[in-house]
Each structure stands twice: as structure tokens, then as C-alpha cells.
Image: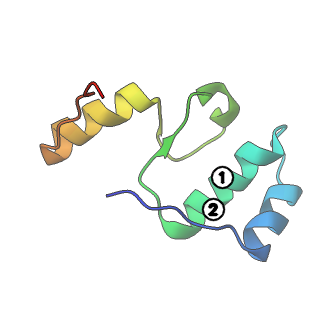
Amino acid sequence: MGSVYTPGEREVDLALASAWDDFDAALVYQTAMSIGARAIVTRNAGDYAASSIPVLSPTEFFSWLERLHNVYYDEIDF
């Protein structure tokens, strides 16, 4: 469902060569492209205006999980 990936030299080179203004966003995008990600989850959707991958806020992501996979998220008190 969700995983953490480390960008490699290829993704760094592609991010540096891209026209994106924000290197961090470019690197996340290139890594997402490399792994075939179905979405990028971020609180800064504006940084991904050029993304061809859907960009979701955390709230949108949990709604998406619920709608597509019947996975429900709810906060619990500690």
C-alpha cells in the first residue's frame, strides 16, 4: 500500500536537469516516476503543478484509500 524509497543517482540527475523550480519536489517526482507510483502525497501540492502523477493531500489520500481499497483511517486518542 505504501512504501518508502530512496532516490538514486539517476533520479538526482533527472531532477537537476528538470525545469522544476523546487529541487526537493523534482526529486520526489522523479523517484515516484521511477517506481511507478500511483500518487504523491504532500501538504505542498503547489510544488507539483507539473506532475503527471496525481498529487493528493493527506486527507485526499485517506479518502482515496477508502474509496478504492475499502481501507479506513481514523485517529485514535493516546
Horizontally, residue 31 falls left or right of residue 22, namely left
Tag 2: residue type?
Thr
Write down the quadrant of residue 72 in the picture. top left
Horizontally, residue 72 falls left or right of residue 38, namely left
* Secondary structure beneath label 1: helix
Badge count: 2
Residue visible at 58% across and 68% down in the picture: 34
Residue visible at 63% across and 62% down in the picture: 31
Residue 76: x percent and y percent? 25, 28
**Mark 1 and mark 2 residues within 8 Å of each other at the beta carbon:** yes
What label sits on residue 31 in the rendered view? 2
Residue visible at 57% across and 61% down in the picture: 33
Residue 64: x percent and y percent? 28, 36
* Secondary structure beneath label 2: helix
Residue 43: x percent and y percent? 56, 28
Q: Could you tell me how far apart the alpha carbons at marks 1 and 2 are, in whole angstroms?
A: 5 Å
Residue 16: x percent and y percent? 87, 57
Q: Quadrant of the C terminus?
A: top left
Residue 45 lies, with reference to residue 33, above or below; the image says: above
Residue lying farthest front?
Answer: 78
Tag 1: residue type?
Val
Q: Quadrant of the N terminus?
A: bottom left
What label sits on residue 39 in the rendered view? none
Foreground residue, 20 or 27?
27
Residue visible at 19% across and 37% down in the picture: 66
- Residue, disc 1: 28
* Other-residue count near label 1 (Cα within 10 Å), few / some / many at <14 / 14–19 / ≥20: some
Foreground residue, 11 or 17?
11
* Other-residue count near label 2 (Cα within 10 Å), few / some / many at <14 / 14–19 / ≥20: many
Residue lying farthest bottom?
Answer: 9
